[in-house]
Image (cartoon, rainbow, N blue to C red):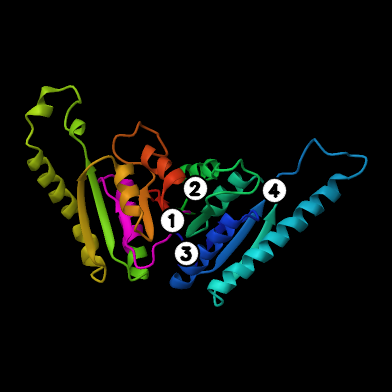
Amino acid sequence: MKAPSAPVVVGVDGSASALAAVRWAADDCARHHTPLRLVHGYPLPVRGYPEIILTAAEIRKAIEDQARGWLEEAVAAARAVAPEVEVTTEVVNAGAVPLLIEESRAARLMVLGSQGLGNVTGLLIGSTALALASHGKCPLVVARGTEVPGGPVVVGVDGSPTSEAALAFAFEAASMRDAPLTAIMCWQDFMVESAYSASRFTVDWGQVEAEEQRLLAQRLAGWEEKYPDVAVHRVVVRDRPVRALMRYGAEARLVVVGSHGHGGFAGMLLGSTSQALVYNAPCPLAIVRPA
């Protein structure tokens, strides 16, 4: 159980994308009255530098000086959004992924940008985000795309434990932002039995949709009682979850999904829907793991 004052942690690497993540996180901290922690991790190079000209200590100092400059820039970006939020920074001699996973143990939320420095054009920060979404100990937000002012929080629902955790996160996010919530449940004809079964041609799809509507209402009932201030729009659609979430996410402030849902292989840490959205979500994306 995380303390109420647990920080939001942002990985900072000097990129414009990381600054966007800092601004998103600072706004979230202001809403929740929690501190903001900005970190940068660096592994020391073990080869590839002229040892006669530069010592390891000099290289380490140069890297740390650069990192501190990036963190100072990030602090300024955070204070421009939320001057009242407490901000701390740290430079750590460690790889980004192990550092962020360790930081997630005490964090309320982790936030990453969608693209870092030094990447090939168009190559996203996906590997770090996927590792953190799979192995982190708290929810992850990838601050990507465009947040639509006044738009809803969109959440994918499938009845799995991670879906229930995503609902908890989404309702709180909508309540804190005075935003409506769009809850989406998807179904497809091959989900009933098999894509090659004759039953595909005899099933009453209207009845299937009605049953999905009933299941969605059942999943939402307790949360609607807990958050009566949140206006809920229920959507049951015959489509792939990624396509539906992308479509509704284009007009949203935030898309929320569980780390994996029904149908995953035993032991799978991240589902195909959340993986695809890390690379393609049209607005900020939250990936929530079950407690």
279 w.r.t. 107: above or below: above
* Residue 166, image x, y percentages: 34, 53
> Does the magenta segment cover residue 164?
yes
N-term mark: 4 or 2: 4
- Is disc 4 placed on a helix, strand or loop? loop
- Amino acid carrying label 1: it is Pro
Real-space Cα separation, disc 4 to disc 2, in angstroms: 19 Å
Q: Name the spot of residue 239 as percent of width and height, x first.
A: 24, 41
What residue is shown at x 76% (from left), y 40% (from top)? Answer: 45
Residue range (magenta): 144-171
* Residue that mark 3 sits on: 3
| Residue shown at 43% from the left, 45% from the top | 280
> Where 132 falls versus 284 (above or below)?
above
Q: Is residue 159 left or right of residue 291?
A: left
Asked if residue 56 lies left or right of residue 96, the reply is right
Question: To which residue does mark 2 refer?
Answer: 136
Q: CA distance from mark 3 to mark 4?
A: 28 Å
